[in-house]
Amino acid sequence: MIARPGPREDHAVTAASTPTPDAPTCRWCGGTDGTVVLDLGEQPPSDHFPPADDPGPDPVHPLRMWLCGACGLAQLAEDPTTPEEPRGAEPDALVAQARDAVARVEAAGLLPRGGTVSEFGSPHGGSWLGLLGATGLTEASAADGPADVVVDCFGLMHAADQRRGLEERTAATAPGGVLLLQFHTLAAIVADGAWNALRHGHFAYYATPVLARMLDELGFEVTHGFLFDLYGGTVLLAARRRGVAGPRDPASVQALLERETALGVTDPAVLAGLEDAARRSAEDLRAHLVASRDAGRHVLGYAAASRAVPLLNRAGVGVDLLPAVADGAPAKQGRRMPGVGIPIVAPDAVVARRPDEVVLFVTDMLAEMRRRMPEVEAGGSSWVIVDPAVRVVTPAG
Ligand SMILES: [Zn+2]
């Protein structure tokens, strides 16, 4: 048989070779004792969607979470060279949370009127500078030196060298200034079984007690802790150099530390629950799609989201089980899911192809999709959500 280019179901497992991963060295403390708590195997970069006629094999890299036994920082075990993450559209939930966070930080007296602010950016969030400017802060230029307020929203995790990353942020903070660090707490990732938070390019996964200790090592004291619902648990810490006068709310910090410590966020056995969650998700999805195929049901996917990539690859789902994934982004249409040969099509295919089921890879979009595509349920089809467990959404549900 002559090989032909085009999407094929056997892309999934075409790693040319499996390099033996080196023993990890902690990105914070340099320690080498630790535990792999989540191993997703060889995974393609989740934001690289090859053209549909690119026969592959796609580049793949090991994707493992390693917990340092010395300092407790959960981190990427490997450092594959991955392209810069594209800056995504800013979801409404993120905009609302930023407004809430700035209001709470201002109410805590942490934003000096007439002071300066500088921001460490991230591919995920929009900038907080507009909101902070409205409170009376002005953006510091490079010539101004360290700023009175330094803000980092989901940025620090992108630093491969965590010590250098945090040192850059503390150095950018004026002697009497405040450093604001926001992150998706590992406590929430573990509690929700959110294994697909593990991502190439996201080098560290912070629990509050661990990040507080890291700051302490650099002479910074956490003065306030704020908790938000975003992503099931987003934490914002405010920190200042030890001994510097200013507002403090030790009870807010203590509450977060106790809550996360009680969850066992630095216990390898607790974190290994993510491995079970990953295995269950993959097995459930595969079993569901096999049953649908055997029953002759026509299935389509929706949203060529980054989080669908490790799930489809881990579950070994190819075009035989999922013939296409629809997505509203024109840049993704005509391409395919990395690692698996599933083509990405325009959303009108969902209505035109009249599938029996639409598997939705972004559960948060369910209400919006039911509104935008009433034809799906009106025509007798069902939405199926997969995150965290596979569930067929009934019209009443
Ligand atoms: Zn360490």
Image (cartoon, rainbow, N blue to C red):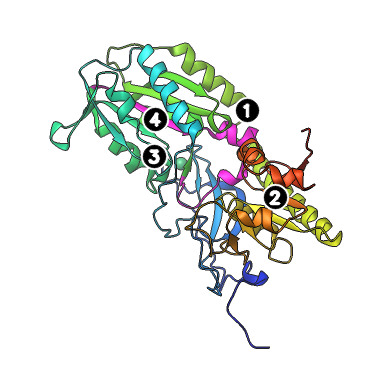
Out of 241 and 306, give the one closest to the viewer: 306
Q: Write down the quadrant of residue 149 in the picture.
A: top left
- Disc 2 marks which amino acid? Val
Q: Is residue 166 above or below residue 346?
A: above
Residue lying furthest left: 143
CA neighbours of label 2 inside 10 A, class few (<14), some (14 to 19), many (20+): many
- In the picture, measured across the screen, residue 298 lies left or right of residue 220, that is right
Label located before the other in sequence (4 or 1): 4
Out of 125 and 198, give the one closest to the viewer: 125
Q: Is mark 3 within 8 Å of ligand 1?
A: no
Q: Residue at x 51, y 22 (%)?
A: 227
Q: Which residue is mark 2?
A: 359
CA neighbours of label 4 inside 10 A, class few (<14), some (14 to 19), many (20+): many
Alpha carbon distance from label 2 to label 3: 33 Å
Alpha carbon distance from label 1 to label 2: 32 Å
Q: Residue at x 59, y 50 (%)?
A: 303
CA neighbours of label 3 inside 10 A, class few (<14), some (14 to 19), many (20+): many
CA neighbours of label 1 inside 10 A, class few (<14), some (14 to 19), many (20+): some
Label located before the other in sequence (3 or 4): 3
In the rendered structure, are the residues bearing label 3 and label 4 in contact, judged by CB atoms less than 8 Å apart?
yes
Q: Which residue is mark 4?
A: 181
The range drawn in magenta is: 176-203
- In the picture, measured across the screen, residue 108 lies left or right of residue 112, that is right
- Label disc, if present, on residue 156 of the rendered structure: 3
In the rendered structure, are the residues bearing label 1 and label 2 in contact, judged by CB atoms less than 8 Å apart?
no
Q: Position of residue 17 (x, y in %)?
A: 56, 72
